[in-house]
Amino acid sequence: MLLIPAIDLKDGKCVRLRQGAMDQVTRYSDDPVAMAEQWQNLGASYLHVVDLDGAVTGCPQHLSDIEAIAKRPGLRIQVGGGIRQVSTIQAYLNAGVDRVVVGTAALRNPEFLAQAATTFPGKVLLGLDIKNGCVAVQGWTEVSSMTPPQLFEKVWALPLAGVVFTDISKDGMLEGPNLLALKEAAQASPVPVIASGGVTSLQDVQAVQALHANISGMIIGKALYEGTLNLPEALKIVTSPGGALPRC
């Protein structure tokens, strides 16, 4: 299972949000590339990078920082935020990005998602963000009436790389993940699921790993920045037989 530190970009800074609210911002670094280097030095081989400004505007705003991170030797990244055109996907892949996350466009423009997935098979992740059981869109600023199973039915035949599943109510709150919703998503999804939102402790890491075989990774953000979760110890759990907690 992949354990994936998150780097969220806003106004050129590395930040974290509370429950996806753009006015609830905590800044952690003025140098996103240095932050990527820090997580890599602590053992991360894969990062989740989000262009928060792009998620709202629909146009990438941090391509130069993302390209610099993607070009670090031995590091792979997936990128989300503002990806609503095939040309944007191509630009990110050309910049060295391993996979891209498509969110809002999947609901607003299913033809685009189908085109993206078939043009770049195995390179497109569906960003599935939920709030109160329904899919959220437009940088988490709007909530639709569609449920995750309904969305899965629409994308069942597409060659997606996977699904990034985020419960907005848990994101940035340090209160633990929504295990029930995550398990239901893993059971219903036709592709592997990456858990996002709420993973706070080593016990959370172990719980997510043991939850369902269709969960292939977990994204961790605020817990790493606030120090409630130690990255090397968490990596030991996901790489050890049985997902055992490290011994004291």
Image (spheres, grey):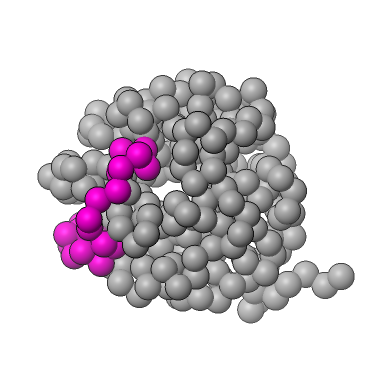
Residue 8 picture location, percent across and down:
53, 36
Q: Is residue 122 visible?
A: no
Residue 215 picture location, percent across and down:
45, 67
Closest to the observer, 203 or 20: 20
Residue at image x 50%, y 70%?
179
Closest to the observer, 14 or 137: 137
Residue 109 picture location, percent across and down:
16, 42
Q: Is residue 243 left or right of residue 104?
A: right
**Was residue 247 drawn as part of the magenta stretch in this picture?**
no
Would you place residue 53 above or below residue 78 in this image? above
| Direction bottom: furthest residue | 242
Residue at image x 87%, y 70%?
248
| Direction right: furthest residue | 248
Would you place residue 170 above or below residue 77 in this image? below
Q: Is residue 156 left or right of residue 8?
A: left
| Direction left: furthest residue | 111
Q: Is residue 171 visible?
A: yes
Quadrant of image for the N terminus: bottom right
Residue at image x 40%, y 62%?
193
Closest to the observer, 55 or 146: 146
Would you place residue 189 above or below residue 224 in this image? below
Residue at image x 12%, y 45%?
111
Count of residue discs: 0
What is the magenta range? Answer: 137-159
Closest to the observer, 227 or 36: 227
